[in-house]
Image (spheres, grey):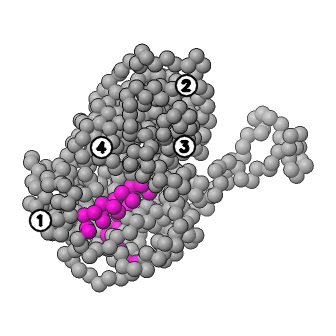
Amino acid sequence: MTIETTPAAPAFTELGLAEPILRAVADTGYTTPTPIQAQAIPQVLAGGDLLAAAQTGTGKTAGFTLPILHHLSTRAVPAKPGHPRCLILVPTRELAAQVEESVKTYGKYLSLTSMVMFGGVNINPQFKALKSHVDILVATPGRLLDHLGQKTVDLSGVEILVLDEADRMLDMGFIRDIKKVLAVLPKQRQNLLFSATFSDEIRTLANGLLHNPKSVEVARRNTTVEVVEQSMHRVPQGHKRDLLVHLVRKNDWQQVLVFTRTKHGANRLAEKLVKEGITAAAIHGNKSQSARTKALANFKDGSVRVLVATDIAARGIDIDQLPQVVNFELPNVPEDYVHRIGRTGRAGATGSALSLVDDEEMGYLRDIEKLIKRSVVRVEVDRDFVPPARPEPTGDDRPPRPPQGRGAPRQGQGQRQGQTQRQGQGRPGESRAAGRSGQPGGNRNASAQTPAGRSVQGKPAPKPGPQAAAHPKKPRPQAALFSSKPGSRGH
């Protein structure tokens, strides 16, 4: 594997892109490519496999969409309904919509067609769209597998495969779905992996999927953009909501993206802000796709000042001038911090990222600082802020204790982790379990209990104690290659 570096970025006109694409780029107002675009576009045009890493917000999407549009427009093939020539896989619905919008923007003067495919919406319009010719398909893995199971899409003609946000796509949460898709793709194809972060383990896994790949890396791995000012307040969990209200009012924040760890926490925080007279909305995996789309649109047009999100939104929100990001709770995966604060400081603009850190989150902060190789500035809480005499109950929102080593839970953390898993941590597949079973969780076979402590069947309930522990789970049958039930996946 070789690393290509370019000292100075040329103009878009020097990269060898077709004239209709250059005209569309000019319409957007861009004349000079970003470093990742300047390095990646020639490599993609050369036709080989590529592993590309760059800080979030630096234009990775255009880094692969522009040369893909060039390739497909200059190599004409017979059109076949439901046979895409390029497949772009992404982890979230929001990111899928964003990428497909970029394809339309840069390909508006070409005759190429595209469509976006994800779960959470009616599958029938997607069936209809696939009956026409589609050159570029942008999809989340779960819904794509649904279509493959229904035989409504044929991937045998895919010339280019893109894994966007590859660190998540190749993480263990998606690797099984990715392998199922790879199994039906043609062996001869171009593979492109783009992401902001790559662990050594993920790089090893990616290398097994690529063939003699080139690698471009425009900055030190897992670093955060320099234009983002990073700071933190040390504050008890029970005071965080009141402090956030104070900060929004005092700083007159008109557009701020706030990240929580759980869906329940996002809902409670949004309700608190609305109660205090601050327009706010929550976006997470339990929201319908129409609600998520509406909340994001209202946030972009300014009718909602505060958008409260789980990490599902960290990979799908693209707002050029977003000035402020707040980590209401630190993520327990350090790489997610990079993606969160990367929502601000995009396209060369400056931004600010503030974290509210409880004592029990200091371990997460140390992991983050180790990853980004810089310290987050400690700032004292404003003296004008007077916390309530009685802090709000934390309940399920209380952050888990920092792990004793990467990913290792402490004693007593299991129960909170179980709650977090049921509520979702905002990771790409957070709504997936509910989408498969149709139930929020728990033991579906458990008998309902009467107030008298007897089961519905009339048998006495088990006495509390060690003997009443849950029975071990029965082994689940191995999943079929594709789902045969349309719309059964939550992506």
What is the span of residues highlighted in magenta in the rendered image? Answer: 82-108
**SS category of the residue bearing label 3:** helix
The residue located at (49%, 41%) in the rendering is 280
Q: Residues within 10 Å of mark 2 (few under 14, many from 20)?
A: some
The residue type indicated by label 3 comes to: Lys
Q: CA distance from mark 1 to mark 4?
A: 30 Å
The residue located at (39%, 59%) in the rendering is 96
Q: Are marks 1 and 4 in contact (CB under 8 Å)?
A: no
Q: Are marks 1 and 2 in contact (CB under 8 Å)?
A: no
Q: Is residue 139 visible?
A: yes
The residue type indicated by label 4 comes to: Gln
Q: Is residue 267 above or below residue 289?
A: above
Name the image quarter holding the N terminus: bottom left
Question: Which callout, 1 or 2, points to the residue nearer the camera?
Answer: 2
Q: Position of residue 333 (x, y in %)?
A: 42, 39
The residue type indicated by label 1 comes to: Gly
**SS category of the residue bearing label 1:** loop
Q: Which mark is residue 238?
A: 2
The residue located at (41%, 19%) in the rendering is 381
Q: Position of residue 266 (x, y in %)?
A: 52, 40
Residue highlighted by disc 4: 321
